[in-house]
Amino acid sequence: MGDENNKADNESMVQSLDPKQRSRRDFLEGAGTTAVLGAAIPVLGVSTVHAQQGSATASATSTIRLTVNGQSRTVEVGDNWTLAELLRDQLDLTGTKIGCNRSECGACTVIMNGKPVYSCSQLAVWADGAEITTVEGLAQNGQLSPLQQSFVDNNGPQCGFCTPGQLMTATALLANNPSPDSDQVKQALVGNLCRCSNYNAIVEAVVMAGEKQGAVA
């Protein structure tokens, strides 16, 4: 009788460990238990050392020098800061927006050494010695750049949240291709999402800016 009970217990244990044998309800209940136990670990003092190590890592800093919108800056940054955090929280350049914060939406795009980059996925320490342009650096002497004015004329902005990233990517495009056609604009802006779905107006704005730029040249 005892052997049969042990066998039943073993089979029950194997079944609970086999994900193919577990229902979604079993999984969720198990996950809940794991979460509760995980939350209790710091209380028991098990992860105190790891918490202290994490705190030490978070407090590490570096001094970097970079040029932002034509101005030389020397800044002490946390080694875990992103470029977006540096620009927004330390340099007060809040035109750079944080949308998805994982390199998908493009709202945080800035120009770094001539190329558009997602500032949410660039560490601030990587920008040491770099030249950065944000949307605040486009207007000169109170005058909108031709691209910014074209966005206004073509109703490019809707809610406006994605507009800074769109402008920065398009600015980098026009610097390398002064008169892009609509297909080239679409290809360049593929990494910039517009949740208002105002893509046609944005493409038209960039194409028009290129045409005016070409006419002036």
Image (tube, rainbow, N blue to C red):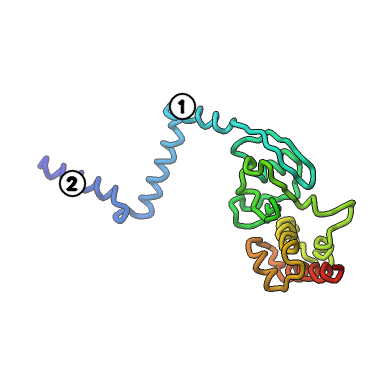
* Residue type indicated by callout 2: Ala
Query: In the figure, is residue 5 to the left or right of 186?
Result: left
**Mark 1 Cα shell of 10 Å, populated few (<14), some (14-19), many (≥20):** few
Does 110 appear above or below 128? below
* Residue type indicated by callout 1: Val
Name the residue nearer the viewer: 22 or 127: 127
Name the residue nearer the viewer: 153 or 133: 133
Answer with mark 2 or mark 1, whichever residue precedes in sequence: 2
**Which residue sits at x=66%, y=35%?**
77
Name the residue nearer the viewer: 115 or 150: 115
Does 168 appear above or below 155? above
Can you say which quadrant of the picture contains the C terminus? bottom right
In x, y percent, where is residue 120?
63, 48
Residue 184, picture quadrant = bottom right
**Which residue sits at x=79%, y=46%?**
70
In x, y percent, where is residue 186?
67, 69
**Which residue sits at x=44%, y=32%?**
40
SS for callout 2 = helix
Does 161 appear above or below 46? below
Q: Residue 49 carries which label?
A: 1
User: Which residue is label 2 attached to?
Assistant: 8
